[in-house]
Amino acid sequence: MLPRLRAPLHLLALGLALTACAPAASPSATPAETLPASAAAYPATLIDDAGRSVNLPGLPERIVSLAPSNTEIVCSLGACDRLVGVTDFDDYPAEVSDVAKVVIGAQVDVEKVVAADPQLILAAGNELTPSTVIARLSGLGYPVLVLYPESLDELYADIELVGRAIDASAEATDLVAGLRTRARAVSDAVASAQQPRTFYEVGVFEGTIYTAGADSFLASLISIAGGDPITGDPLSTSIQLEDLVAADPELILLGDAAYDPSITPASVAARAGWEGMTAVTEGRIVVVPDDPVITRPGPRIIDGLEALARAIHPELFS
Amino acid sequence: MTVGTDALVAAHDLVVGFPLPGGGRREVLRGVDLSLARGELVALLGTNGSGKTTLLRTVAGTLAPDAGTVLFDGRSVRDWRRGALAQRVAVLPQQLELPLGFSVAELVAMGRAPHARRLFASSAADERAIARALLDADALDLADRPAEEISGGERQRLLVAMALAQEPDLLLLDEPTLHLDLAHQLGLLGAIRRLRDQRGLTVLAVLHDLNLAAAFAPRVAILDEGRIVADGPPSEVLSVDLVRRVFGVPVDEARTSDGRRHLALREV
Amino acid sequence: MRAAATTSPRYVTRPSLTRAGLVLGGGGVLLLVAMLAAVAVGSVGVGVGDTAAILGRRLLALPLPETWSPAAETIIFELRLPRVLTAMLVGGGLAMAGTVFQALLRNPMADPYIIGTAAGASLGAIIGILAPVLLPALALGAGTAWLGLGMVQAFAFAGGIATVLLVYAVARGNGRVPVVTLLLTGYAVSSVLAAGVALLMFMSGRALGAIFGWLMGSLAGATWPSLAFAAPLLATSFALLLLRWRRLNLILLGDEPAAHLGVEVEREKLVLTMLATLATSAAVAISGTIGFVGLVVPHLLRLATGPDHRLLLPAGLLYGAALLALADLGARLAGGIPVGIVTALLGAPFFIWLLRRSRDLSRAATS
């Protein structure tokens, strides 16, 4: 886990000192970031999720995103037209299909990134963008912000970080406030419900079962959605079958069913060794088609959170 | 046996043994004394396994004895730098695995390595030495043939040429007449004898044919069970008694037309 | 016995100058073409005129008007040129090291990694990749990415060299290192280290992609600084190995015959091993374990040059460099796949062809 600061401390202090109000009156644990939209914010020095200090000499008009989640953040801040490079995996919003692809088949084409002449590059942490590529690009002089949120609060901080980077802080504040509201609505709704032991199946490959890693983003989402997540090894995200049986899930969510139609509650119930689980005997195996949104750490993850809550507590959501 | 300060090479009290696979040790040389003066031509004879090749390797300095010394030109061969020694001593091995792809002449040229001066090319002196070696070894007609295509006898001439290309002072030959027909055997030994006569080459040759050794060398040394048991002119050393004692074979004495002693085999 | 009078010899004692000229000249031309093609072509099109102008301006300080974009200059000079030069040095180094090991070990199946370099460098590299992931204390804030790159290279280099020293020390007995013992010890030590590599890969989690990319061998990380690290090491080993062609030829005759011809065999084996290992480790440190170049290039060249190292070594340098530069061009055009995949795809069929050819040749020879 890479050490990172949640928010640049000096800007937090500045926000506290200013009297401008947050547009949405949502109670939140930390005071919302406020900056006058017309503040001369450049040159700016920002700290990214990898703890790297990144210098932005001016307003970035040309932005390259190396991960679909970063693309969605930029577009949700209203800066979609400033994107000059995205990945071939980007599918939302629809207008990014016209943008040049600089990441093809998960390989970052450095030449194409350079050709796009970016003024800001948004990379993904934890080797999703290889650290060698990050080093290469920053070595060439491009400002590279590495984003890797592992919780909702970290995601909100990342949205605000990007907002600060591209001079869309007001939009970021609005967006975060809205997301917080919806998240709060979910956690309020499930507050008094009993939390079932929930197993979220990310995939089963060659006999190895992949799920939410301990202390992972997915695990925190399940918690907020009112479930008690059964988690796997934090590094490999795998869990041994005997550990899963010992944990005895009461609810099995099939995230991989979104990609593989052969994975159904019936096929899972038929698996050798799974028949003793409470979820199987009680028939609480649920297909979750929203896995693409649940696992993409962008603004639509709240959609995913709501989908999780509906899957875990169908009785609370009509 | 000449032991003195004018000996080119002198082996003294050599003891050499090899470890056996199952443990223990096989003593091959058990105290060998042998010296050659400059220009001496000596044939080394003995039974199989008596240590002839081992003695040659120890004299050449590539095998370290358990005890005893070998002096070349007054200095222990273990003290000589390999490169310097190779300019003076050449070895004709009993067998040599020839690497594929080289011509006969290219292999003979490798014999010039100890004298090589230029970084990437050979000098005119090298070329002359190679030509002379091929001539002396009667291998000129083989020179541009691929080495892997020549016959056993031709190979032998190649090996001789390689050793001669070194222009050594001391030539150590291990069974040089192997694979050669009679004419070539005599031709080769005749050439070596001529080289000794003309250029003062010192020669120690391991031979297996007693009569050939007698016809070729003015001095023979007999190695039996790791010791030199006889050393001197063939007319004195090669007797019926010695042959029966060392080789365990009964022979009859005869005379050649030029009056030398010949050991004749009886019917098998 | 015939007396043959000769004034001028009808034989040759070395590869003919014509053959040497053709082989080395051809290699030089191929290298030049490969270099130009690899710099001029990539996933982003930069016009030939612009390419030449950029190179002229940056390399030769020609005062040319700047008609190209800064992006084009970055692509040509910061991305492609160091990558192509790295490919050339690595390709030449692996080919030379392979040639040396094939002679030293008298084994045509020898490649530069055979006595443990790959296994040791891989283990070092993986430790370098995983250390910042497993021990956050080593990921020092803003410098993480850069430090990570430097660490992987350094650990890989150290791992390669240390492993060969270990193998050599273990294989040594009575002050001699018999060739077979060296081979077997290299194999044994490599196997142990490979098990360590596999274990770390299993534990690696998200870093598995980075590890796999390194193991396959890739020139994507080639920068001017990494070139500055490896180039002096490679150049030194090239020069010293080229000068030792005679000793390599003699070693082909066998340990004892070589000694009789003046080679200090044990010392020479050590020197040759260490020079080849230096080149291999430097290459592997900056490009991962690229396969087949060190095995196939010497084999192929021997068909054209013969076994004389006087010609074989410099030819290996030229053709190895050219071939890897071209293979890397192919890798880039194929979507940025690791160049090790390209060399394997090309090298394996060539290797099979070579095996069949040598089998047919030996069958003809013994029939």
Image (tube, coloured by chain):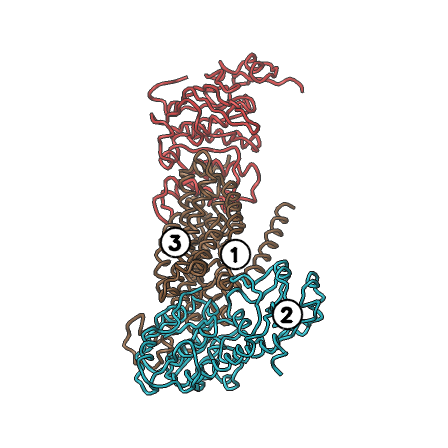
Label 1: which secondary element: helix
Shown colour of chain C: brown
Say which amino acid is labelled 1. Val
- The percent coordinates of residue C204 (x first, y second) are 51, 59
Residue B228, which numbered label? none
Give the answer, above or below, for where C172 lies relative to A264. Answer: above
* Extreme-top residue of the structure: B241
Q: Do labels 3 and 1 share a chain?
A: yes
* Numbered disc in front, either 2 or 3: 2
The residue carrying mark 1 is C296
For the residues labelled 3 and 1, say whether their Cβ atoms are less than 8 Å apart: no
Q: Mark 3 lies on which chain?
A: C
The residue carrying mark 2 is A251
B220 on left or right of A51: right
- The percent coordinates of residue C85 (x first, y second) are 39, 64
- The percent coordinates of residue A153 (x first, y second) are 45, 74
Q: Of the residues under marks 3 and 1, which one precedes in the sequence?
A: 3
Residue B179 lies in what quarter of the image? top right
- The percent coordinates of residue C39 (x first, y second) are 41, 71
Q: Are marks 2 and 3 on the same chain?
A: no
Label 2: which secondary element: strand
Residue C238, which numbered label? 3
Say which amino acid is labelled 2. Leu
Spatial CA distance of label 3 from label 1 is 19 Å
Task: Pick whichever, B112 or B27, lies toward us.
Answer: B27
Q: What is the crowding at mark 3: few (fewer than 14 residues within 10 Å), some, or many (at least 20)?
A: many
Which quadrant is home to the N terminus of chain A?
A: bottom left
As drawn, the chain in red is B
